[in-house]
Amino acid sequence: MPRRRSYDQYCAAARALDTVGDRWTLLIVRELLAGPRRYTDLHADLPGVSTDVLASRLRDMERDDLVTRRKLPPPAAAVVYELTPRGAGLLPVLTALAAWGAPDLGEPGPTDAVRTHWFALPLLRTLGERVGAGAGTVEVRLSAAPRSTFHLHLGADHAKEAAGAPGAAYGEGPAPAGPDAVLTLDAATCRALCGGTSLFADAMRDGAVTVEGDGPLAKALRGE
């Protein structure tokens, strides 16, 4: 394998950037935080990346013990990429970056690609702050265009148990085993919550967010 480029600085931040500072690397991690993904799925949800660059980044990430490959059993028989425990350790880095960048989102531009599950990372932080140590699966339903559903796993231990993969913090579609709470809101409210321009309690009071569920997590989200 070719030698990895380095800043050659004896600094923890520089060492981290030696590994994850290349363009697309952290966005690949973002996609794999949903669990194992096929190469074609990764390429579809990383608009703008070339096939050569994606393949190169995945090779580098395998070399650096961020991702691993495995073949699914029949009838799927597909090769998937998934995060290693070291790669999954980047979740707090991605959530912090998402929180820092969310105020700059504004309205989508005419050339912006949009994937609803990209709301997952900033929402993980927003809801985590709301429920504290609470753990469970939250299903998020966007009620207006673009209609979509995705789910979040709050709490590290719960995420590992529910998703069966290191670092699987969220997933597309309904929660496979049923959610502990269901949030219904529109995309504009979701953007406002992610960007810090709206507080969760205010959005609930105004009816912009509804929370369904009878368990501790749903009650914590409602502030009961």
Image (tube, rainbow, N blue to C red):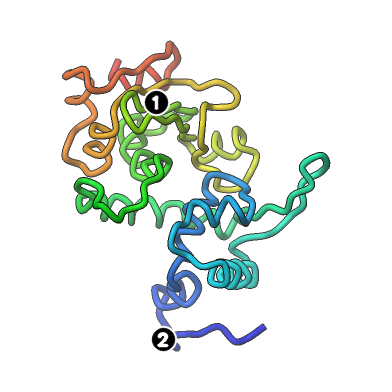
Looking at the rendered structure, the secondary structure element under dot 2 is: loop
Asked which quadrant contains residue 130, the reply is: top left
Q: Which residue is mark 2?
A: 9
Q: Which residue is mark 1?
A: 141
Q: Going from the N terminus, do you reach mark 1 or mark 2 first?
A: 2
Q: Is residue 8 left or right of residue 52?
A: left
Q: Which mark is residue 190?
A: none
At horizontal 34% and vertical 22% (from top left) the residue drawn is 184
At horizontal 54% and vertical 53% (from top left) the residue drawn is 88
Residue 40 drawn at (x, y percent) = 61, 54
Which residue occupies the foreground of this view, 155 or 172? 172
- Up/down of 81 relative to 188, above or below: below
Which residue occupies the foreground of this view, 176 or 112? 112
Q: Name the residue at the top extreme.
A: 214
Q: Is residue 209 left or right of residue 58?
A: left
10 Å crowding of disc 2: few (<14), some (14-19), many (20+): few
Q: Is residue 10 left or right of residue 75?
A: left
- Up/down of 30 relative to 2, above or below: above
Q: Name the residue at the right extreme.
A: 74
At horizontal 53% and vertical 71% (from top left) the residue drawn is 53
Report if the CB atoms under discs 1 and 2 are less than 8 Å apart: no
Q: Which amino acid is tagged 1?
A: Arg
Number of numbered discs = 2
Which residue occupies the foreground of this view, 204 or 10? 204
- Image quadrant in which the C terminus is located: top left
Residue 209 drawn at (x, y percent) = 27, 22
Q: Which amino acid is tagged 2?
A: Gln
- Up/down of 99 relative to 192, above or below: below
Asked which quadrant contains residue 74, the reply is: top right
Residue 164 drawn at (x, y percent) = 65, 39
Q: Nearer the viewer, mark 1 or mark 2?
A: 1
10 Å crowding of disc 1: few (<14), some (14-19), many (20+): many
